[in-house]
Image (cartoon, rainbow, N blue to C red):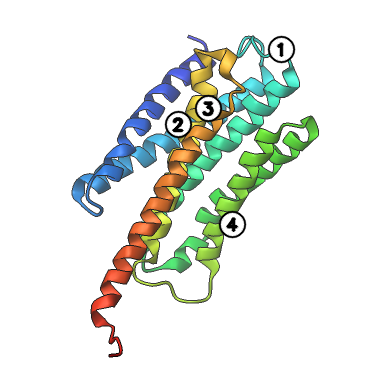
Amino acid sequence: MHLFEALIVLHVITGATGLIAFWVPIATRKGAQSHRKWGRIACYAFMGAGALAAAMAMLSLYAPEGRHPTITDRTVFEGLFVWMMLFLGLLTIGFADYGLSVVRHARDRLALRGARYQAVMISVILSALWCGYFGVQIGNALMIAVAFLGVTAMALQQKFIWQRADPGPKDYVDEHFRALIGMGISAYTAFMSVGLIRWVPEEVFNPLIWAGPSIVGVSLIIGFTLQIKRKQRSKIAPHSNPSI
């Protein structure tokens, strides 16, 4: 078995594990044992899949022949299946790593400023900038859009890490949720745009394939945010003193 084919097999195994395990913590009670257990499984599986995606992207750069023969424009191939695939792999790792770390260091935000965590986020930002630059060079709006979203996501994480005000005791929950939903978005986008089109290559440029995970993920984030606000209002209401 060739190296690239072996990486694909491992990528499918880790990716499928993450894609399935991802929904268990979404559906179970937050903080429960099953939530924590399956959340870790999903994160580590996606991190493995992201690392394998990055490795395959680099192999595709130096040996593109036969990877996706339906795409005859090698420049477009390099953009989508090398630089954007590399970026999506690193983005998935970045989201998963941050989602776990904000819980691990819920009471010590200074730890997130360390070189180990910063290196991961900086690598995501650099790969996003290169992906966006390459997209501008070849006129590919998709590469530009995903790069912009990646830089924005990392910037929001850095804002939380470096803000001067002390975070509230539960602020990490919002960060944790958004990071892991972001992880799901990037992983599902990579699966649908890179993996699924191996079976249906004619749909490689279908915008619904690329936008679908983002639509679902953003909807979950909005729903979670509204749920948190409703809970906060319900806690404040009993203690209010309305005038008569």
Q: Which comes before the other along the chain, label 2 or label 3?
A: 2
Q: Which comes before the other along the chain, label 4 or label 3?
A: 4
The disc at residue 49 is: 2
Q: Amino acid at mark 3?
A: Ile
Q: Nearer the viewer, mark 2 or mark 3?
A: 3
Q: Amino acid at mark 4?
A: Ala
Q: Residue 162 sits in which quadrant?
A: bottom right
Residue 46, image x, y percentages? 42, 36
Number of numbered discs on residues: 4
Residue at figure coordinates x 55%, y 56% from the top left: 118
Instruction: Quote the CA–CA distance across marks 1 and 3.
Output: 21 Å
* Disc 3 target residue: 209
Q: Which comes before the other along the chain, label 1 or label 2?
A: 2
Q: Residue furthest left?
A: 33
User: Can residue 50 be seen from the camera position used here?
Assistant: no
* Disc 4 target residue: 155
In the picture, the quarter occupied by the C terminus is bottom left
* Disc 1 target residue: 72
User: Are there few (<14), some (14-19), or many (20+) residues within 10 Å of tag 3?
Assistant: some
Residue 190, image x, y percentages? 51, 30
Helix, strand or loop for disc 2: helix
